[in-house]
Amino acid sequence: MRVSRTAVPGTGTIHQCVTRGGQRFGVLSDRAGRYRLLIYAAGSDEPLQSIVLEQDEADQLAEILHSRPIVDRVAHLERRVAQISEMAQIAGTTS
């Protein structure tokens, strides 16, 4: 997917996205912490639809789209920290 980022003066930042299939959408983040999903019709520069998301809704959507839930990622990190800590303890006892 191609993604371009543009500052929108007085509003925020827009990320324009084009999928491999040529479909376009955008994510406009404003200064108040809200997000707008912008859906474009083929060949149009004007959004066909705009969906307003509050911060918590954007977080929920990001969680859905992420390949692994946050809980799983945190559990993985905790396991890695325990492994590294154990390795450090072993290395400390052999030196």
Image (cartoon, rainbow, N blue to C red):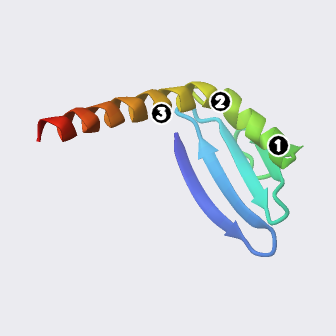
Q: Secondary structure at mark 1?
A: helix
Q: Which mark is residue 20?
A: none
> Along the polypeptide, which appears first: circle 1 or circle 3?
1
Q: Residue furthest bottom?
A: 10
Query: Tag 3: residue type?
Result: Leu
The answer to whether the residues at label 1 and label 3 have Cβ atoms under 8 Å apart is: no
User: x, y (%) of residue 42?
Assistant: 71, 38
Q: Are there few (<14), some (14-19), or many (20+) residues within 10 Å of tag 3?
A: few
Q: Is residue 69 visible?
A: no
The residue to which callout 3 is attached is 77
Q: At 82% across and 43% down in the image, what residue appears?
A: 56
Q: Nearer the viewer, mark 1 or mark 3?
A: 3
Q: At 78% across and 45% down in the image, what residue appears?
A: 38
User: x, y (%) of residue 57?
Assistant: 83, 39
The residue to which callout 2 is attached is 65
Rounded to the nearest angstrom, the CA distance separating label 1 from label 2 is 14 Å
12 w.r.t. 65: above or below:
below
The residue to which callout 1 is attached is 56
Rounded to the nearest angstrom, the CA distance separating label 1 from label 3 is 24 Å
> Along the polypeptide, which appears first: circle 2 or circle 3?
2
**Residue 42 relative to residue 33: left or right:** left
User: x, y (%) of residue 10?
Assistant: 81, 75
Query: Tag 2: residue type?
Result: Leu
Tell me the quadrant of the picture where the C terminus can be found.
Answer: top left
